[in-house]
Image (spheres, helix red, strand yellow):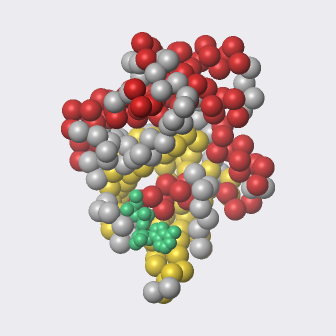
Amino acid sequence: MNDRMPIVSFIDVTKTYETQEGPVHAVENITLDVKSGEYLAIVGPSGSGKTTLLNLAGSLDHPSSGTVLFRGQNLAELSRREMAALRRQEIGFVFQTWNLVKGLSALDNIRLPMAFARIPKQEQITRARKLLELVDLADREDHPPDQLSGGQQQRVAIARAIANKPRVLLADEPTGNLDEETAQTIINLLRQLNQTENVTVLCATHDLALASVADRSVQIVEGRLQQDG
Ligand code: ADP
Ligand code: MG
């Protein structure tokens, strides 16, 4: 596939939530291409629709109208099974709260998505160790989350997110819970993964340092795209 092809396309996408107070238009008429290999930041204030947009890109949510394409394929036309495979193999998720499994070591947390993808155990371990090196935590493989700092837990979460070599990493305010210095290590790591592992990064943030390392940033306010470029 051509490298400049859009990997995710939003075509006139609107997501409306029905609430007791009436409909909430979380995102409205969004048209946007995320190109293969790029690092795109979505910047906007709290409540502007960033998480909704990422969830739509990752097929965790469905648009009320409009179309979301993943590598040219309409997500609405995928079967449940195809959707699950897509989420398992092609998309990595990183959240503001890293959600590691409490009782499991760093190594085993990273192995989890590979186990779900039925990768042989020895390969899981080999790959998880490589990933721990990549995120500079080789000496912490036996540590469970409660023996890791916030920044270290986020690095494990990122390693876990890329364990199945996804094409796209969806990062939702990945530095939101970190102090400035620790946030910088996460920012550098995402940049590095984008460049060396060729992962497309779609990152929601209001951290300007995080947005400034992106190839491109778009602004979203009250569910609407403000600018593109
Ligand atoms: P952001 O991530 O930029 O803070 P969100 O995408 O989480 O914004 O939310 C956008 C808007 O949609 C907000 O007004 C939020 O309250 C509303 N919203 C999000 N999820 C739901 C939901 N499940 N039900 C009702 N309203 C929602
Ligand atoms: Mg959000």
- The structure residue drawn at horizontal position 32% and vertical position 55%, both measured from the top left corner, is 43
Relative depth, front residue between 24 and 29: 24
Q: Point out residue 226 in the picture as x, y percentages from the top left corner.
A: 33, 66
Relative depth, front residue between 5 and 53: 53
- Is 44 left or right of 80, judged from the image as shown? left
Residue 15 vs 176, above or below: the answer is: below
Relative depth, front residue between 104 and 76: 104
- The structure residue drawn at horizontal position 35% and vertical position 72%, both measured from the top left corner, is 222
Residue 137 vs 72, above or below: the answer is: above
- The structure residue drawn at horizontal position 71% and vertical position 18%, both measured from the top left corner, is 121
Q: Point out residue 192 in the picture as x, y percentages from the top left corner.
A: 39, 26
- The structure residue drawn at horizontal position 70% and vertical position 62%, both measured from the top left corner, is 76
- Is 121 left or right of 160, judged from the image as shown? right
Q: Point out residue 211 in the picture as x, y percentages from the top left corner.
A: 29, 45
User: Quadrant holding ligand 2?
Assistant: bottom left
- Is 10 left or right of 119, judged from the image as shown? left
